[in-house]
Image (cartoon, grey):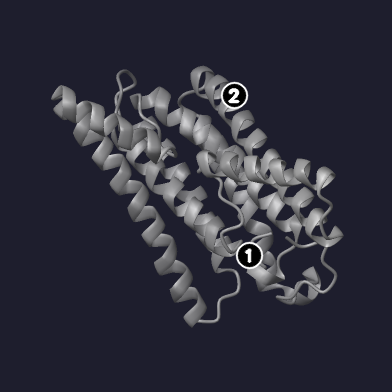
């Protein structure tokens, strides 16, 4: 699911990628909020908090929001540099390497928390790192799917879900082309499942980070690394994995 790009991707690839990484994003977003009281994947909320902090003269809140937004922004830029460089080198698994980098940095953040940060109190450095990784992840998924899938932007996903649901309902009163209707149903299923996985990840994050704050991010890191490895192995051993860079028998495509 991290090997094929845009037109070569199927609904199944986008669903697997979107649901798994939306689950990760939901968990990381909650962990960031519990850590410092700010969201790492929700830049809309941080922009709003920035405006409120500015109006109330809360300098610390303003600086925190700016730092989180800048970290997310830099993560998206990092993804672009990685992908562009990988394309120039003909690296087919560059998206998988981008997600692998996310997993390794998640593990690093967890180790920094465990060995170098005091066990009590809130610290801004881990949420800044998590915000960077969410920008990296969202940009990676956006580029590989051709902007079909986003894993941290719930506002956009709910907007798409509302549009698709309205189209689906309207098709009962005003029949449309069967192929167009089938694509609407696929997109409806895709975005509803991604939203559900983000919510589920948030619930797991709330429980997991509260119960095991020292080890939770390491567990998430292992999940992310496991998601990246199939694409990397498919690129390293194309004959044994059956991957050629093309999807010869795809399920229905979006």
Q: Is residue 236 above or below residue 143?
A: below
Between marks 2 and 1 in the image, the one whose residue lies nearer the viewer:
2
Quadrant of the drawing holding the N terminus: bottom right
Residue at screen point 60% across, 26% down = 204
Task: State how far apart marks 2 and 1 are (Cα).
Answer: 30 Å
Question: Residue most toward the front?
Answer: 174
Question: Can residue 5 be seen from the camera position used here?
Answer: no
Element assignment for label 2: helix
Q: Is residue 242 above or below residue 43?
A: below
Query: Residue at label 1?
Result: 232
Question: Can residue 173 be seen from the camera position used here?
Answer: yes
Residue at screen point 54% across, 58% down = 142
Q: Is residue 145 above or below residue 223?
A: below
Quadrant housing residue 26: top right
Residue 214 relative to residue 55: left or right: right
Image x and y of residue 120, in percent: 32, 18
Query: Residue at label 2?
Result: 203
In front here: 221 or 191?
191
Q: Residues within 10 Å of mark 1 (few under 14, many from 20)?
A: many
Residue at screen point 56% across, 50% down = 150
Q: Residues within 10 Å of mark 2 (few under 14, many from 20)?
A: some
Element assignment for label 1: helix
Quadrant housing residue 159: top right
Image x and y of residue 147, in percent: 56, 59
Marking on residue 100: none
First in residue order: circle 2 vs circle 1 = 2
Image x and y of residue 182, in percent: 82, 55
Quadrant of the drawing holding the C terminus: bottom right
Residue 152 relative to residue 68: left or right: right
Image x and y of residue 93, in percent: 60, 69
In front here: 135 or 146?
146
Residue at screen point 61% across, 46% down = 160
């Amino acid at each position: 699911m991290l090997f094929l790009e845009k037109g070569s991707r199927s609904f199944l690839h986008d669903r697997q990628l979107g649901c798994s990484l939306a689950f990760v994003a939901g968990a990381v977003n909650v962990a960031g909020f519990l850590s410092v009281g700010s969201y790492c994947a929700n830049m809309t909320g941080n922009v709003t908090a920035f405006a409120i902090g500015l109006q109330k003269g809360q300098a610390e809140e303003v600086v925190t929001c700016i730092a989180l937004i800048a970290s997310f922004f830099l993560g998206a830029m990092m993804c672009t540099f990685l992908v562009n460089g990988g394309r120039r080198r003909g690296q087919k698994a560059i998206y998988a390497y981008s997600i692998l980098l996310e997993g390794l940095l998640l593990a690093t953040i967890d180790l920094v928390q465990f060995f170098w940060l005091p066990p009590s109190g809130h610290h801004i450095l881990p949420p800044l790192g998590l915000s960077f990784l969410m920008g990296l992840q969202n940009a990676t998924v956006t580029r590989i799917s051709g902007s079909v899938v986003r894993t941290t932007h719930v506002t956009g996903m709910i907007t798409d879900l509302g549009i698709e649901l309205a189209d689906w309902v309207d098709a009962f009163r005003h029949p449309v082309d069967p192929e167009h209707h089938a694509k609407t149903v696929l997109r409806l299923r895709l975005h509803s499942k991604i939203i559900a996985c983000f919510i589920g990840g948030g619930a797991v994050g709330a429980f997991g980070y509260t119960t095991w704050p020292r080890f939770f991010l390491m567990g998430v890191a292992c999940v992310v690394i496991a998601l990246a490895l199939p694409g990397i192995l498919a690129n390293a051993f194309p004959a044994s994995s059956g991957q050629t860079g093309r999807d010869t028998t795809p399920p229905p495509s979006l």
